[in-house]
Image (spheres, helix red, strand yellow):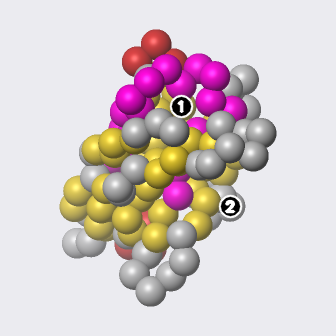
C-alpha cells in the first residue's frame, strides 16, 4: 500500500477557491486510479473525482465544471482544484489510491474544507 497525506483545506467564503494536494509515499505512475472523496457530517463518503494513470478523469455531477483533478507523477502528487465553492461542498476530503487488480485501496487521513461566510 501507499501512504497518502492531504493538505490545502481550510475555511473559504462561498464563490472562493482552494487547491488540495495529496502527496504519496511512493511513485504513483503505476497506480491505476487516484481519486478524491468527501464526507460531510452525517453522510457517507462519496466520490468527488478520479483520474486514471492514462489521464482519464471522472467527476461527480455536483462538481462538474467547478473542480479539476490532476496528477503529477514526477512529484507523486495528486491535486484537486476547487472553484466556485458552495456551502454544500463543506466536508472532509480524502485522497484515495486504487491500484486495481483487486489490491486494497489506500486512504489518507483527510483535510477539512469549510465553505461559509
Who's the residue at 63% across and 43% down the image? 98
Who's the residue at 59% across and 49% down the image? 105
Residue 15 on the magenta segment: yes
Q: Is residue 42 left or right of residue 28?
A: left
Please give the range of residues in magenta: 14-37
Say which residue label 2 marks: 61
- Residue 11 point in image, percent of width and height: 22, 61
Q: Is residue 115 left or right of residue 71?
A: left
Q: Nearer the viewer, residue 83 or 79?
A: 79
Q: Quadrant of the C terminus?
A: bottom left
- Residue 106 point in image, percent of width and height: 52, 47
Who's the residue at 69% across and 33% down the image? 32
- Residue 99 point in image, percent of width and height: 65, 37
Q: Nearer the viewer, residue 89 or 7?
A: 7
Neighbour class for label 1 at 10 Å: few (<14), some, many (≥20)?
Answer: many
Say which residue label 1 marks: 70
Mark closer to the chain start, 1 or 2: 2
**Nearer mark to the viewer, of 1 and 2:** 1
Q: Is residue 63 left or right of residue 83?
A: right
Q: Quadrant of residue 47?
A: bottom right
- Residue 30 point in image, percent of width and height: 63, 22
Whole-angstrom CA distance, mark 1 to mark 2, is: 17 Å
Task: Please say whether residue 102 is visible from this viewpoint.
Answer: yes
Residue 94 on the magenta segment: no
Q: Which mark is residue 116?
A: none
Who's the residue at 46% across and 70% down the image? 39
Neighbour class for label 2 at 10 Å: few (<14), some, many (≥20)?
Answer: few
In the structure shown, which secondary structural element does the residue marked by tag 2 occupy? loop
Amino acid at each position: 500500500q501507499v501512504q497518502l497525506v492531504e493538505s490545502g483545506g481550510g475555511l473559504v467564503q462561498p464563490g472562493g477557491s482552494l487547491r488540495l494536494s495529496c502527496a504519496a509515499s511512493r511513485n504513483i505512475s503505476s497506480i491505476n486510479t487516484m481519486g478524491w472523496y468527501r464526507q460531510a457530517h452525517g453522510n457517507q463518503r462519496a466520490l468527488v473525482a478520479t483520474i486514471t494513470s492514462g489521464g482519464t478523469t471522472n467527476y461527480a455531477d455536483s462538481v462538474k465544471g467547478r473542480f479539476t483533478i490532476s496528477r503529477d507523477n514526477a512529484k507523486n502528487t495528486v491535486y484537486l482544484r476547487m472553484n466556485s465553492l458552495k456551502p454544500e461542498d463543506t466536508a472532509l476530503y480524502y485522497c484515495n489510491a486504487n491500484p486495481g487488480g483487486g489490491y486494497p485501496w489506500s486512504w489518507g487521513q483527510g483535510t477539512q474544507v469549510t465553505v461559509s461566510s
